[in-house]
Image (spheres, helix red, strand yellow):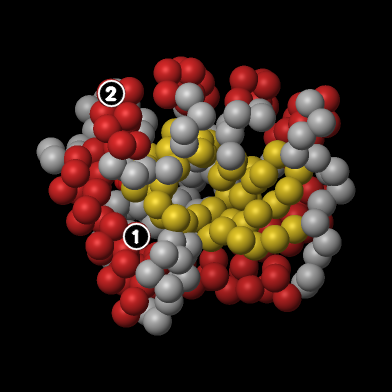
C-alpha cells in the first residue's frame, strides 16, 4: 500500500463528491481510522496532514495517545464500556458511540469531577442489525431528552455504521434516514445541543454517505490498506 497515494485519492474523491453535490469542498472532516495500524505509520499519516484519528478500543486508543501526543484529535468510534470511560475522558475530542443512559451517567460523572464537558454523538443503528450497537431511530428523541439533563455532556450530532453491503439503495435509504433525523432534531431547537456532525461513511460507503449529507467520514482500509487482525 502507498499511504501518500491512498490519502491523496481519498481527499480528491471527497472534494469531487462535495463539489458535485454543490457543497463547499472542505465540508467533510476526514477521520483516519487507525485500529491495528502501527504508530510509525500513523505518524506518517499525520505528516501528510491527517488531523483526526479514530480508534474503537480503549486500550489501543490510550496507547496511541501516549505514543503520538496532542498533535491530532482523537475520536472514540467503537462501543464504550462504562468502566473504561475514566481512561479516555478528557483526552478524546469526540465520542461517537453514546447509546445508553448508563454510559451517559458515567460520562457526566467523570466530566463533572474534572470540570470538563464530554462531547458526544448519538449512535443510531438504523438498520437494526443485531450485531451492532446503537439506538433505533424511534428511540433517539426520547433518549436525547434524557441526556440533555446531564450538565457535563454536549450532544454534537449523530453517528451510524451502515451494513456492509454493496446495495446502494439500502445504503442511501439509511443515510437519508439519518439526515432527516438530524434535521428533525435541529428543528426542535433544544438548548445545549448542536447537530454539527453527521458521522457516517466508511471506505465502502463514504461516497453515498456524503451525497446524502454526511460531514464526517471514518476511513480505515481506504487509507492504510487491508487490516491484519
Ligand atoms: C473500522 C471502523 C471504520 C473504518 O472502516 P473501513 O472499512 O476500514 O474504512 C469506521 N467506523 C468504525 C466504527 C469502525 O469500527
Q: Position of residue 24 (x, y in %)?
A: 43, 73
Q: Is residue 105 visible?
A: no
Report x, y in % for residue 88.
60, 25
Q: Is residue 70 visible?
A: yes
Q: Is mark 1 within 8 Å of ligand 1?
A: yes
**Residue 39 placement, left or right of 59:** left
Element under label 1?
A: helix
Horizontal and vertical percent for residue 20? 32, 79
Image quarter (top left, top right, bottom left or bottom right) of the C terminus = top left
- Decide: is 133 above or below 227: below
Q: Which residue is mark 2?
A: 40
Of marks 1 and 2, the one in the foreground: 2
- Which residue is located at x 34 percent, y 60 percent? 206
Q: Residue at x 47, y 70 (%)?
A: 213
Disc 2 crowd rating (10 Å Cα; few below 14, some 14-19, many 20+) is few
Q: Which residue is mark 1?
A: 206
With 165 as the anchor, is 179 left or right in this view?
A: right
Q: Nearer the viewer, residue 223 or 129?
A: 223
Is 80 positioned to the left or the right of 219 in the image?
right
Name the N-terminal-most of marks 1 and 2: 2
Amino acid at each position: 500500500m502507498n499511504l501518500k497515494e491512498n490519502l491523496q485519492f481519498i481527499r480528491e474523491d471527497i472534494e469531487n463528491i462535495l463539489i458535485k453535490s454543490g457543497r463547499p469542498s472542505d465540508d467533510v472532516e476526514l477521520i483516519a481510522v487507525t485500529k491495528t495500524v502501527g504508530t510509525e505509520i500513523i505518524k506518517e499519516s499525520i505528516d501528510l496532514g491527517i488531523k483526526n484519528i479514530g480508534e474503537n478500543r480503549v486500550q489501543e486508543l490510550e496507547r496511541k495517545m501516549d505514543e503520538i501526543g496532542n498533535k491530532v484529535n482523537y475520536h472514540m468510534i467503537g462501543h464504550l464500556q462504562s468502566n473504561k470511560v475514566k481512561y479516555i475522558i478528557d483526552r478524546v475530542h469526540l465520542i461517537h458511540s453514546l447509546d445508553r443512559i448508563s454510559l451517559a451517567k458515567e460520562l457526566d460523572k467523570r466530566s463533572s469531577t474534572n470540570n470538563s464537558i464530554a462531547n458526544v454523538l448519538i449512535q443510531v443503528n438504523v438498520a437494526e442489525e443485531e450485531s451492532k450497537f446503537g439506538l433505533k431511530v424511534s428511540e433517539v428523541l426520547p433518549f436525547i431528552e434524557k441526556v440533555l439533563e446531564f450538565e457535563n455532556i454536549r450532544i454534537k450530532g449523530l453517528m451510524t455504521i451502515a451494513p456492509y453491503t454493496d446495495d446502494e439503495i439500502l445504503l442511501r435509504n439509511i443515510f437519508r434516514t439519518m439526515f432527516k433525523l438530524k434535521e428533525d432534531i435541529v428543528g426542535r431547537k433544544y438548548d445545549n445541543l448542536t447537530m454539527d456532525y453527521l458521522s457516517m461513511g466508511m471506505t465502502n460507503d463514504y461516497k453515498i454517505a456524503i451525497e446524502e449529507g454526511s460531514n464526517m467520514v471514518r476511513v480505515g482500509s481506504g487509507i492504510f490498506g487491508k487490516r491484519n487482525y
